[in-house]
Image (cartoon, rainbow, N blue to C red):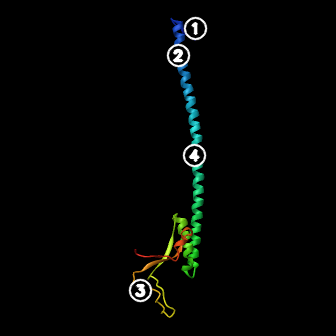
Amino acid sequence: MTFNRQPNDPVQFFARFLQNECKTMKVVDEDRHAALEQGRNRIAHEDRLREVKETAKVKKTEEAKVDDEKKAFFDDLEQSDDLNDKLQSLIEFLQEHTKATGIYIGNLQFPEVPIEDDAMEMDHLNQEAPKVIKFTHASEDHKYIINRTLTED
């Protein structure tokens, strides 16, 4: 190459040639590293897409399971002759699907008072006092509230 060009200063020519070659090699090396990084990023992206698809599939399966449980619960309710028999099941269903810490059901009624043996049918209720809530059903960790009364004060 030096012979073909016949430079005036061969040392200077050769130094420039080496500098150009060095710059060219640096660019080639940077391009190679960029291509490797791009390949790694592509693989990581594909892995992440697979992971997202698997997560979505698991979530969809769980949602289908929850939907099946809900359908079974409501089908059971529709077939029931007395819905009062299903109140405890309702509490368990609500606690599971709302993540509530405690659920309880009560009746709004007049307060109960002690009665004599010869009392009339409704004498055990004080119908002059304001109504209270008497709890009849509760979630497992709130069973202590069953048969207790909640008054206004």
Q: Earlier in the sequence, mark 3 or mark 4?
A: 4
| Residue 147 percent location from the top left of the image | 52, 77
Which residue occupies the extreme bottom position in the image? 118
Q: Nearer the viewer, mark 1 or mark 4?
A: 4
What residue is shown with label 3?
127
Q: Quick one: label 1 or label 3, which is nearer the N terminus?
A: 1
Report if residue 137 is visible in the image. Answer: yes
Which element carries disc 3, helix, strand or loop?
loop
**What residue is disc 4 on?**
48
Which residue is located at x 57 percent, y 50 percent? 52
Q: CA distance from mark 1 to mark 2?
A: 19 Å
Q: Residues within 10 Å of mark 3 (few under 14, many from 20)?
A: few
- State how far apart marks 3 and 2 are (Cα): 106 Å
Specify the amino acid type for callout 3: Gln
What SS does tag 1 mark? Answer: helix
Question: Mark 1 to mark 4: distance in Å?
Answer: 57 Å
User: How far is disc 1 from disc 3 in space, using C-alphas?
Assistant: 122 Å
Which residue type carries mark 2? Gln
Q: Which residue is mark 1?
A: 3
Sequence-wise, which precedes: disc 1 or disc 4?
1
Q: Is residue 26 above or below residue 86?
A: above
Position of residue 77 measured from the top left corner of the image (x, y, whole percent): 56, 76
